[in-house]
Image: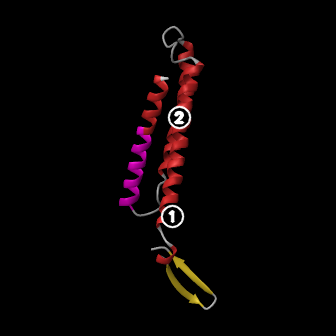
Amino acid sequence: MVNFLFDVFSNLALLATVLLVCGLYNRFTAGPAVNGAHVFAALASTALALDAALTFLVFADAQNRYGQFSAPAAFCQRAGAYLFSIVAAFAWHSLARRKRDTGVRADKALVIRTSPYSESHLRM
């Protein structure tokens, strides 16, 4: 259980770092925004695939030396920590987006009258 909690906390620290870097990148550069949750999910998925390769290919050949790391139960704990942090990343992203969307009120929208039949609403 201690290893699971350490894995979760280290993954959440990595998530915070990725979100901070992506936020700074989005703030200081022009162009399309980088989604930190998607970047973290890609990093965590790659780490999970490499962890599976290490566990079942490398550590399995040296059972006497890496016995505690090559157990399927240990891999399941690490995989659970990866999946938990990916779910936390997308939950954080959806909560932040929902909060950001409710912060913009409809009465602060800029209305451009383009024709008698249509109006364009732009957020300010």
Please tell me whether the stretch drawn in magenta is mainly helix, strand or loop: helix
**Residue named by callout 1:** 101
Q: Tell me if 104 is positioned left or right of 17 in this view.
A: right
User: For the residue marked with disc 2, what is the amino acid?
Assistant: Tyr
Screen quadrant of the C terminus? bottom left
Relative height, residue 71 to residue 120 (above, below):
above
Residue under the point 44% across and 38% down: 12
The x, y position of residue 57, in whole percent, is 57, 20
Residue under the point 49% across and 53% down: 35
Stretch in magenta: 13-29
Q: CA distance from mark 1 to mark 2?
A: 29 Å
The x, y position of residue 23, in whole percent, is 40, 54
- Residue 25: image quadrant is bottom left
**Residue named by callout 2:** 82
User: For the residue marked with disc 1, what is the amino acid?
Assistant: Asp
Residue under the point 54% across and 78% down: 121
Work out which residue is located at the far top of the displayed protein and give it.
Answer: 64
